[in-house]
Amino acid sequence: MLIDSMAPVLMVPLVVVLAPLLAALVGRVVRVPLVVFEVVLGLLIGPAVLGLAPTDGFVDDLAEVGLAMLFFLAGNEIDFRQINGRPLRRSVTGWLVAVVLMVGAGLLVAGNAAGAVYLGVALTSTALGALVPLLRDAGEMRTRFGTAVVAVGAVGEFGPLIAISVFLSGRDPGVATVVLLAFVAVTAVAIWLAGRATHRGVHRLINATLHTSGQFAVRLVVLVLALLAGLSYVLGLDMLLGAFAAGVLMRLVLRNARPADAVLVQSKLEGLGFGFLVPVFFVHTGMTFDLRALLDDGRALALLPVFVALMLVIRGGSGLLTAPRGAPRTDRLALTLLTATGLPIIIAVTAIGVERDELTASLAASMVGAGMVTVLLFPLLGLLARGRSRGEAPVQTEPATDQGT
């Protein structure tokens, strides 16, 4: 009994360590995103395959924290001065078009309005948190291509979170909208104050504790993340909305810190997130994937490639609106593939649907399976396509305030 209860606690860290080793080994031949190994290894050790690590409450809770940290880091990466203007406007337009088209497709697949809404919200998301490490490792964060991906990803995470809060909260949409606006107002005031203040006292304390056991910066981040995620939860909103907002807020707080301090703090946060919490979430995703429900339902299994195709054509195609002017065809293909990469919000949305008996377990597994396929394949193919155009002459950079359409 004790061995069974300890299995997840031992196996999950083992897989978290093994995943980058395998990624480095395979990387000698072809560069595969690390998340691929985390999800696949989680599936192998989970109940669906080998059964070495049954899920338990502790790992479940830790995975929830990892998901919140993933959205925090995604929000923390967004520089609105960089994506403002054409990239952001085009991304919003593209996402709205994708939602309308995906809801229409959802009506044909699910046969009812509730199922169509779940499909429309889930399958139009973009996993910015999973893409940011890949973009940074590839040196793309400050390129025009990287700016387009970040803009698409920011809208592809924030938009679905708003839709979840309004349409999937269990409240009347009017009441849900009022509650959401109240949360947005509180968060907007906090972000406005954070952007105006210099925070010199905070920066001095951060500097004084960077190399001590105090680690004030990390503790402050954990507090802000807990406060905003907790506030969104208390208001009946998705906690990921608060986690995302916390990332944006902390970016502003640290914006005027000494560059060396800001870099070191960012490194510590990424160490905590990508070194521990976020991998636990992706491993847990593999462990909890309901493979049996998918395999036992022929229709759900047949729908999995259909969902992948819908994500690629509808969500991926909407990303083309944000492509930089003059972008080569390979860049457009890469942007399409990265835009269509989604998983965390799909997991969150399908969990809500199954809990409310508005989605069957098999259909939810099909949607999550489609998300897993996009995470496994699309970033790899997208970065390969992007690599073919890296040597081309760069297109002139567009100003962030460009108003052209």
Image (spheres, rainbow, N blue to C red):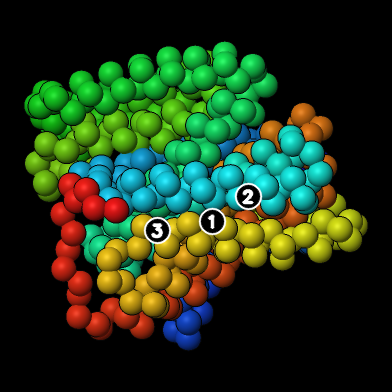
In the image, residue 99 sits, relative to residue 300, either above or below, namely above
Q: Are marks 1 and 2 in contact (CB under 8 Å)?
A: yes
- Pointer 1 or 2: first along the chain: 2
The answer to which of marks 1 and 3 sits earlier in the sequence is: 1
Mark 2 is on which residue type?
Met
Identified by mark 3, the residue type is Leu
Residue on which the image places disc 1 = 315
Residue situated in front as seen by the camera: 237 or 58: 237
Instruction: Give the residue pinned by disc 2.
Output: 102
Q: Position of residue 33 (x, y in %)?
A: 48, 67
Image quarter for residue 187?
Answer: top left
Is residue 254 left or right of 98 when viewed as pictured? left
Q: Position of residue 46 (x, y in %)?
A: 73, 55
Image position, residue 234 (x, y; %): 53, 15
Residue that appears at 69% across and 33% down: 352
Q: Position of residue 112 (x, y in %)?
A: 79, 39
| Residue 196 appears in the figure | yes
Classify residue 354 as left or right of residue 292. Answer: left
Q: Which residue is mark 3?
A: 321
209 versus 88 height, above or below: above
Residue 269 is labelled as none
Tell me which residue sits at (20%, 75%) in the image: 394
